[in-house]
Image (spheres, rainbow, N blue to C red):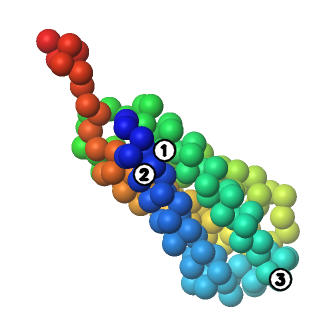
Amino acid sequence: MDWKRYVLAFAAFVVLTFAFAAPWHLWLFKEVYDRLGAYTRAEPIFALGLLSIVLEGIVFVSLYARFRTDRHPAAEGARFGLLMGVFMGAYGALAVGAKMTVSSLPLWLLLEGSSFLIQFTLVGAVVGLICGRRLVARSERR
């Protein structure tokens, strides 16, 4: 993949992930997270959250660029995103939930698990569209 598409896909990952995760955790379901007792910091440290998203974006786009095939870009990106959502959610929902005391573990798992699956699937579809189909060299087509 050329650098222009890589940088655009990375930027889309960062912007869309932040645009999804911030409202999900800080507005839409903030009261639920508060009732769960999941977060104990009064004010989140946005710089660390953004750094996490940047690192995730570098890994996500790099892996997608390396392993994509010639299938439909949006569908392939969504499948890849779903797979990465399961991978990230295994820690972010299951392992973190195992270490925290929340008022309802099933609700925590549902909410956080859904967040990872939805976010990564949607972002994956967009990254897939930006990256497009792999360009096959002429010598490989013969």
Residue 28 placement, left or right of 41: left
Q: Of label 2 and label 1, which has the lower sequence position?
A: 2
Q: Are marks 2 and 1 in contact (CB under 8 Å)?
A: yes
Residue in front for this viewpoint, 7 or 141? 7
Q: x, y (%) of residue 129? A: 31, 51
Spatial CA distance of label 3 from label 2 is 33 Å
Q: Is residue 138 visible?
A: yes
Q: Amino acid at mark 3?
A: Ala
In this rendering, is residue 71 above or below 15?
Answer: above
- According to the picture, the residue beneath numbered tag 2 turns out to be 9
Q: Reading the chain from its start, which is encountered first: label 3 or label 2?
A: 2
Q: Residue at x 20, y 13 (%)?
A: 139
Q: Residue 42 got which mark?
A: 3
Q: How far apart, in angstroms, are the residues tagged by discs 2 and 1?
A: 7 Å
Classify 66 as above or below 141.
below
**What amino acid is at disc 1?**
Val
Q: Nearer the viewer, residue 107 or 32?
A: 32
Q: Nearer the viewer, residue 46 or 97?
A: 46
Q: Mark 3 or 1 closer to N-term?
A: 3
Q: Nearer the viewer, mark 3 or mark 1?
A: 1
Quadrant (top left/top right/bottom left/bottom right) for the C terminus: top left
